[in-house]
Amino acid sequence: MGTSVRKFNTFSFFKLPSAWWCGVRLKSIDKQKAIVTVKYKWFNQNPFNSMFWAVQGMAAEFSTGTMVIDQIKESGKRISMLVLNNTANFSKKATGRITFTCEDGHKIKEALDKTIATGEGQTVWMKSVGVNEDGVVVSTFEFEWTVKLKKK
């Protein structure tokens, strides 16, 4: 898997099919920021006529995880990654297209550099904020990622 938007979205089709079918799509990625969108539709709704919280969670996690994957690949090391904890806050009904943005790429770099240097696992909290088409925050997710060198 490469680091292009197209390759990440193809990856999601094969490895995260529930996210792909719900409409979760990576729009852009670089070393500092990733942007993921998802559109409210009949099959990702809840009984309150808004987007199901878990669909929002998939999009938010994808915005953080794509940068973790990208930077692990760039390191050239065998490093495992896993979500250890997460928190979420919902502040408005999620309807229309929701855009999740994570700008914590620098945190991953620090954690990866430290785990490579010390051989010890590291954790890093990353935040993804979801806004609707009017720019209003609908939800905020935080994920605690763990990274550690794989044993040979």
Image: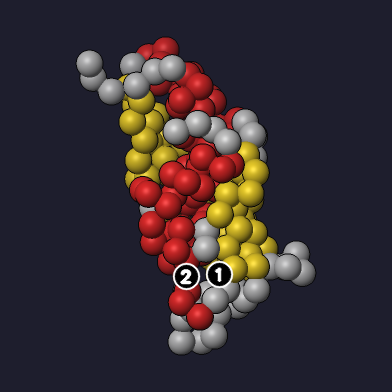
- Per the rendering, the mark at residue 144 is none
Residue under label 1:
90
Q: Is residue 128 visible?
A: no
- Above or below, comparing residue 52 to residue 121 in the picture: below
Q: Residue furthest top?
A: 117
Q: Residue furthest left?
A: 152
Q: Residue at x 46, y 87 (%)?
A: 47
Q: Residue furthest right?
A: 134
Q: Residues within 10 Å of mark 1 (few under 14, many from 20)?
A: some
Q: Residues within 10 Å of mark 2 (few under 14, many from 20)?
A: some
Front one among 29 and 14? 14
* x and y, in percent, of residue 20 in the image: 46, 58
- Above or below, comparing residue 64 to residue 98 in the picture: above
Q: Residue at x 45, y 26 (%)?
A: 72
Q: Residue at x 63, y 65 (%)?
A: 98
* x and y, in percent, of residue 8 in the image: 50, 42
- Amino acid on which the number 2 mark rests in the picture: Trp
Front one among 142 and 101? 101
Front one among 8 and 34? 8
* x and y, in percent, of residue 143 in the image: 46, 48
Q: Which is more foreground, mark 2 or mark 1? A: 2
Query: Answer yes or no: do the residues labelled 2 and 1 have beta carbons within 8 Å?
Result: yes
> Left of 49 or right of it: where is 82?
left
Q: Residue at x 47, y 66 (%)?
A: 22
Quadrant position of residue 41: bottom right
- Above or below, comparing residue 143 to residue 136 in the picture: above
* x and y, in percent, of residue 146 in the image: 38, 36
Colour approach in the figure = secondary structure
User: Between disc 2 and disc 1, whose residue precedes?
Assistant: 2
- Amino acid on which the number 1 mark rests in the picture: Phe
Q: Secondary structure at mark 2?
A: helix
Residue under label 2:
53
